[in-house]
Image: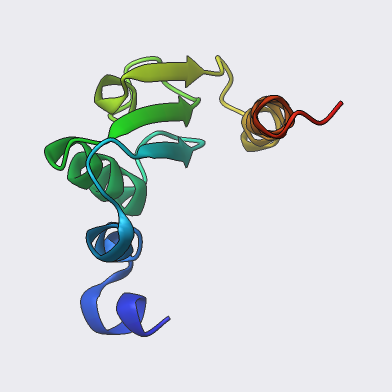
Amino acid sequence: TCLANDLGYEHVFSLPLGRYAQAGDLLFAVSSSGSSASILNAAQWAISHGMFVVTLSGFAPDNPLRPLGNQNIYVPSTSYGTVEIAHLAILHAVLDDLTGSQ
């Protein structure tokens, strides 16, 4: 919370990336609306530092997050609940695949 308080919530994810991320790492950028400043800043930081970015968004098909991803997953809904549950199911499936869980 000190990052958000001292430097602004829009930097709460990009600043830790600067400490821990490396070129070639993978960032999943998740924003229901696709316009959350904190997520957009993190995705832009990741791109500028050679990371691979997967975006998950909803609402408007031309939201600002979509063009930032190397891969994009878009949920065509304007309902937060629908978009968030779809993202949850997608990320759950990705984790199951990565960990070999069934």
Foreground residue, 58 or 22? 22
Foreground residue, 73 or 9? 73
Q: Is residue 76 left or right of residue 41?
A: right
Q: Is residue 51 left or right of residue 85?
A: left
In the displayed structure, would residue 72 be above or below residue 96? Answer: above
Q: Is residue 60 left or right of residue 68?
A: right
In the displayed structure, would residue 6 be above or below residue 64? Answer: below
- Residue for point 62% across, 29% down: 83
In the displayed structure, would residue 81 be above or below residue 14? Answer: above
Relative image position of residue 52 (x, y in whole percent): 31, 30
Relative image position of residue 87 (x, y in whole percent): 63, 31
Quadrant of image for the N terminus: bottom left
- Residue for point 71% across, 34% down: 99
Relative image position of residue 73 (x, y in whole percent): 49, 18
Quadrant of image for the C terminus: top right
| Location of residue 4 (image quadrant) | bottom left
- Residue for point 30% across, 53% down: 21
| Location of residue 49 (image quadrant) | top left
In the displayed structure, would residue 87 be above or below residue 40? Answer: above
| Location of residue 85 (image quadrant) | top right
Q: How many marks?
A: 0
Q: Is residue 92 left or right of residue 27?
A: right
Relative image position of residue 12 (x, y in whole percent): 34, 65
Name of the residue lying farthest toward the left: 48
Name of the residue lying farthest toward the front: 100
Q: How is the image coloured?
A: rainbow
